[in-house]
Image (cartoon, rainbow, N blue to C red):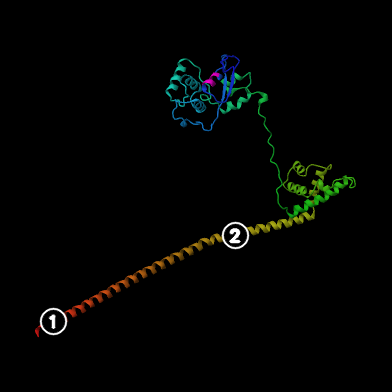
Amino acid sequence: MALGLGQNWSRVQRVVHVGRGDPATIFQMIGRCGRGGNPGLAIMFVDPVRRNGKNKVSDFTNHENQNDDDRMDGLAITPVCLRVCFAIDNNLGYNPLSKEDPNVEREVAQEIAAGFPACMCSNCVELSPEAVSRLIHMDNYNFERSIVDPANIPALGLNVPFQRVASGPAYRVAKGPLTSRLEEQAKYLVGEFNTYFYQHFELSLSSYTPQKFFNLDKARALVIAAEDSQPVTILERLIGGEVVEGQMLFLLDHIAHFKNGDAYLELLATERIQKQAVVIKKAHILLFQQLKARLRPQKSLVTKQELEHKKIVREEAARLKREMNEERARLNREKNEARKRQREQEQAAKQKAREENQKKVLEY
C-alpha cells in the first residue's frame, strides 16, 4: 500500500508484483524500487497464456487503442524495452508492441539525448545460462553486483549444489524358470541351510523355521546372482541379510562345494548337450531358410516365363478369333451381295418378259 501511495524509501531495492491491474498502477509500485541511487530489481509475474486474452502480437488489431486488459496483455508479450513501454503508457495510454513504432523510436532518442543509462530490463538484456546458474549465490551483500554482473557472482560455500554420488545399477533377478542345474543347486542350499540353522538354534525353543529366513525363492535368487558373479553385498541383499552369524560365508562355501561335485558336473554336461542341440536346430532352420530364399527367385522366374507364355497364347487366340470374325463378316457380305444381284437379275428378267408379252399383245 505504501508503495502504491508513492512513498520513497531509499532501502527498497526489490519489489515483486503479482496480479493484474493497469501498467500505470504497476509502474507506480515498482517505481519505488532503487530510489536511493542503488540498482533495484523489480519482478512482475504475468500469465504466459491468459484464457480469452490476447497472447500474441497478431491478436491486437489496433495497437494504439487498448483497454486495461489489452495494456496488461501487451505488457506481457511486448518485445519493446519495458522502460520505454512504461513511458509511452504513462503519456499516451497504450503499450507499444513493435520496435518500429514511431513513438518508440522517439522515446529512445529522447532517452539517449537525456543521457539515460542503458536499460537492463529482461527485454533489453537476456540472462545467459551461466548467469541464471549463479543466481543461487545472491544475498544481501552481493545483491547490487548480482544485478549489474550476475554471471560473475562469487560462489557461496553453502550454496554449492550437492553432487549425488552415482550409484551402480540395481541388480534384479530375472524372472522365469531355472535350468535343472541351478534348480538342483538351489534345493541343495535350502537343505544345507536347514541343517546349519538347527545347529545354532534349539528346535524345541525356536518359534521360527529355517524356511522363514531362507526359502527356495531366496535360494534361486542367490544361485542366479552367484552365476552372474555379483559381489557379496548384492548376494546378501537378495537373501535379506544374515540371520545366523556366518550364514553368508556358509552359503558361499556350499555353492563352491556343489560346483565341485559330480552331480553338478553331470548336470553341466547335460545342459551343454542341450544347448548344442538347440544351436544345431537353429542352424538347420537357418540353412532351410537360406535354401528357400535361393529357390524363391528361380520359382519366380519360372512363374514369370509361364505368365509370358500364357499371355502370348491369349494374344494369338484373340488374333485368330478376330481374323475368323472378319472372314465370317466378309463371307456374309459377299453372300448378301450375291443374293441381291440374283434378285435384281430375276426382277430384270421378269420385267423383260412382261414387256415382251405386252408387245406381243399389241401386235395381235
Q: Position of residue 34 (x, y in %)?
A: 57, 16
What residue span does the magenta drawing correspond to?
24-28
User: Does 25 lie within the magenta span?
Assistant: yes
Secondary structure of the residue carrying tag 2 is helix
Answer whether residue 78 is visible to the viewer in this image: no
Left/right of residue 22 with respect to residue 241 in the rendered view:
left
Tell me the number on the disc at residue 287: 2
Instruction: Name the residue located 70 percent from the left edge and 58 percent from the top edge.
Output: 274
Task: Count the marks.
Answer: 2
CB atoms of marks 2 and 1 within 8 Å: no
Q: Is most of the magenta stretch helix, strand or loop? A: helix
Which is nearer the eye, 32 or 197?
32
- Which quadrant is the N terminus positioned in? top right
Which is nearer the eye, 328 or 283?
328
Work out whether mark 2 precedes mark 1 in sequence or the reverse, and give the earlier one: 2
Quadrant housing residue 2: top right
- Which quadrant is the C terminus positioned in? bottom left
Which is nearer the eye, 82 or 186?
82
**For residue 327, above or below residue 124:** below
Q: Nearer the viewer, mark 2 or mark 1?
A: 1
Q: Badge 1 is on which residue?
A: 358
Which amino acid does the dot numbered 2 rest on?
A: Leu
Which is nearer the eye, 197 or 25?
25
Q: Position of residue 336 (x, y in %)?
A: 27, 74
Answer whether residue 263 is visible to the viewer in this image: yes
Left/right of residue 34 with respect to residue 330 in the rendered view:
right
